[in-house]
Amino acid sequence: MRLKWIAAALLVCTLIACGTAVVNPVSGETELSAMSEEQEVAEGAKGHQQVLQEYTVYNNPAVQNYVNALGQRLAAHSHRANLQWHFTVLDSPEINAFALPGGYVYVTRGIMAYMESEADLAGVIGHEIGHVTARHGAQRATSQQHAGLGVFAANILGLVLESQGVTGAGQMAGQVSQTVAAGYIASYGREQELQADGLGAEYLARNHYDPHNMVDVITVLKNQERYAVDVAKSEGRPAPTGGGWLASHPSNDQRLQQIKQTADSYGASSTYADDGRSRYLQVVAGLAFGESADQGLVRGRNFYHGGLNIAVTAPAAWTIQNESQQVALVNAATDAALLIKPVPPAVGKTHAEVIRNGFKPTQGKSEATTLNGLQATHFTGVRQNEQGQNLGLEFTLVSGPENHMYALQYAAKDAATLQANRSALREAESSFRAMTAQDRQAAKPWSIKLVPYPKGGFAELAKRSPLPHAEQQLRLVNGFYGGGEPKPGQLVKLVDAS
């Protein structure tokens, strides 16, 4: 459970009343802009501090230095080599990369796990550099100003995908619990994403990498979509729809088609240097895979947090969404959930104080109980929202290990849905516990190891991995989800317990 709200690089600023004429470094055309280059740099620096508050920087100097050196080489041959560029690896399993105006670029260790070579990673970074060099953040600020919006969200998230097939579960949990996000995630438009893809290919060529590696990057995204659909079908869940944030972007099919044409225009791949696969594999050897232990780990139907010494088990067919400030156990229809949240100490020292100060019910009743030996209080009642409407309220407060208190809140789209899921919600609640020795054994983090590809193929390799869909996921992480095999003895990535 990440106790900080993870929102990628939200910037809020007051825009000037009218724009100024600025020459776009990529197009060479003059455009009316709400931000000068100096303002871009200043806003990027502010946003960088917010990113460092919301994300943890990956604690691996060798990986950080490698990514920074690669990024600096790419930026030096970009349309804005004059900027002071910053490249940071974030300790997140998200398959994601994003940038802020002024030269701040971020990649997650999650996306690094799925890249197959230095040239692939260069394509990811080049795409993000392209958003900065083409001034897409400033363009968005300008368009929002013209639309009368007084905020600017610089987050671009150009390469994010929900890879586990639980699209919208986190958003649903936030909505049903009536929480208000501290900002919003804004996406760039179709043409800007396609332009960034093209600039990524151009920066690859300028640095003597094959622009076709940009095709590999988009293929990774496409395969993530395919995997999410395949897993959903195998588990009897609805296939992800690609709605929400992804809906405003060009489809990965379209991106794939266009980037192939762009890459082909640069000529034969034989004219480019080595793709750096061997160098890259040595860098990602030992890279943490999936959630990190200090954020909590999802293992099948179980959630473990070693630092907090807590565990919980989801009912059959429910999923676990490990979010920034809560863990959500979500039903298959994504219309009901048990939300597990740590209670800030300032809210109260006793269950009665927390109920009164934190939830502020207008009426209700409390029942003292226990959960696996932990003192608990179940509350059922009513509270009023800001509009004065009465809302049902049901939760259990638990005094957990290490002197931490937790709220286990029932949430559903309506009263009928809550009642229909009450038995499963009770089951989930009753599993909340201090970690046992068996839990600690199951809660080992995962990392990437390099091994020779066995004669038995991915089926044999899968026997050595704890991944829930091991053969499919190992194909995915090694770039063979669409078929094919590495050569026997060739080094490949294996995800194993650390």
Image (tube, rainbow, N blue to C red):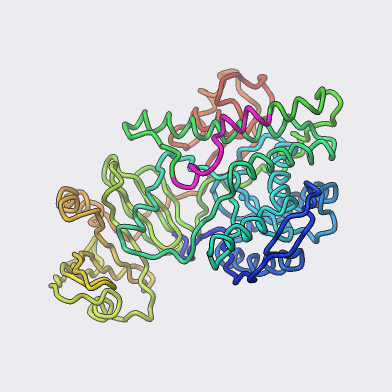
Residue 131 seen in the figure: yes
Quadrant of residue 404 within the rendered picture: bottom left
Please say whether residue 247 is one of the residues in the magenta stretch: yes
Q: Position of residue 469 (x, y in %)?
A: 45, 32
Q: Residue 434 or 59: which is nearer the viewer? A: 59
Q: Position of residue 133 (x, y in %)?
A: 75, 52
Q: Residue 370 or 469: which is nearer the viewer? A: 469
Q: Position of residue 147 (x, y in %)?
A: 54, 60
Quadrant of residue 395 within the rendered picture: bottom left
In this rendering, would 174 be left or right of 257? Answer: left
In this rendering, would 255 be left or right of 26? Answer: left
Q: Position of residue 130 (x, y in %)?
A: 72, 47
Residue 478 seen in the figure: no
Q: Residue 451 or 105: which is nearer the viewer? A: 105
Residue found at x 43% / y 31%: 229
Q: Considering only vertical position in the picture, is 90 above or below 11?
A: above
Q: Residue 269 or 100: which is nearer the viewer? A: 100
Please say whether residue 364 is one of the residues in the magenta stretch: no
* Secondary structure that dominates the magenta span: helix
- Looking at the rendering, the stretch of residues picked out in magenta corresponds to 244-259
Residue found at x 68% / y 31%: 259
Residue found at x 61% / y 50%: 108
Q: Considering only vertical position in the picture, is 292 above or below 307?
A: above
Count of marks placed on residues: 0
Q: Considering only vertical position in the picture, is 172 above or below 51?
A: above
